[in-house]
Image: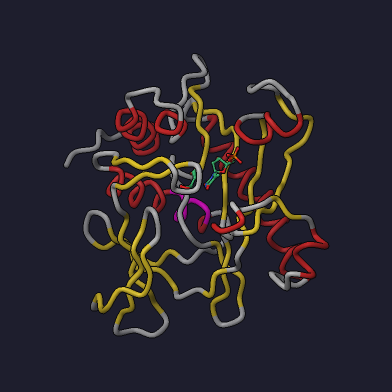
Amino acid sequence: MQKLEMLYEGKAKKVYRTDNPECFWVEFKDNATAFNGAKRGTIDHKGVLNNRISAYFFRLLAEKGVSSHFVSLKGDRDMVVKALKIIMLEVVVRNIAAGSLAKRIGFPEGTLLEKPVVEFYYKNDALNDPLVNDDHIKVLKLATTEQLAQMHQTALQVNRILLEHLAGKEIDLIDFKLEFGLHNGKLLLGDEISPDTCRFWDKKTGEKLDKDRFRRDMGNVEEAYREIYRRLTGKNFEE
Ligand code: TMP
Ligand code: ASP
């Protein structure tokens, strides 16, 4: 398969057309941003690590019956995916209060939630990705009732699979963000699943092993991503 012209450049990835109209080619960058691009930096080897970590999670989910856009890895920082028409929503699942939820409802970070909380955010940089409810999604025509129900259900299923898998790796899954898209009318999981898009805490110490180390200037950011890779695969990341 050939990587052709770039279709889109996002904050953390570039998307290319390929010679197969059914597939896109995604390149993961080392660039990191936070707070809607207000904070910018680079995390060495992040592109390679997130490419491999995302592939690991998409393969795990496929084994458990959750379909994603992932097709195959290509080299270090690239993957081939099914061409999706992205639904302009970010679907967040939370098990423990942290980040914006801790602020919004006033729970101290680390508070166990009685049940997983699913939230939808409108992917719109100009509006700063606002939280939206089912009615907002309906009037904005972002998704149909059926698609919304399917995203909600799949997000909870992904949560159950990841929670159980990560518990075996001594990692607490605090929260994560998913994106979905349509491929020939079928709803598939898209984007990435990585320390950029999840909160991972060490089960014993509570140490943060994700992008919060970058957002909050905590240091040892690359080391945290490498540690997640090591715990998942049992291998040290090597260049
Ligand atoms: P939040 O607490 O900042 O709303 O983040 C919830 C989860 O979503 C967290 O795991 C990080 C992830 N996330 C993204 O993947 N992209 C984003 O732009 C934001 C704000 C959060
Ligand atoms: N990816 C987001 C951004 O720059 C924010 C985040 O992950 O915190 O804008």
Question: Residue 186 is drawn in which quadrant?
Answer: bottom right
Q: Determine which quarter of the picture holds residue 136.
A: bottom right
Which quadrant would the C terminus be assigned to in this image? Answer: top left
Vertical placement of residue 99 versus 192, above or below: above
Residue farthest right in this picture: 135
Residue at the extreme left: 239
Q: Quadrant of the N terminus?
A: bottom left
134 vs 126, nearest the viewer? 126
Q: Residue at coordinates 32% horizontally, 55% vertically from top-left?
A: 28
Q: Where is residue 78 in the image (x, y as percent from the top left)?
A: 28, 60
User: If the picture is divided into quarters, which one holds ligand 1?
Assistant: top right
With 150 as the anchor, is 28 left or right in this view?
left
Q: In this rendering, is residue 58 above or below 22?
A: above
Q: In this view, does 121 lie to the left or right of 176?
A: right
Magenta stretch, main secondary structure class = helix
Magenta segment includes 103: no
x then y, percent, for residue 111: 70, 22
* Residue 1 visible: no
Residue at image position (25%, 75%) is 3
Q: Give the range drawn in magenta.
A: 57-61
Q: Which residue is drawn at 36% across and 64% down?
A: 9
Q: How many marks?
A: 0
Report x, y in % for residue 173: 57, 33
Q: Is residue 105 shown to the viewer in this render?
A: yes
**Quick check: 178 above or below 34?**
below
Relative to residue 196, is residue 4 depicted above or below? below
Q: Give the image's coloring scheme.
A: secondary structure
- Magenta segment includes 60: yes
**In the image, residue 127 lies at what x, y percent?**
61, 56
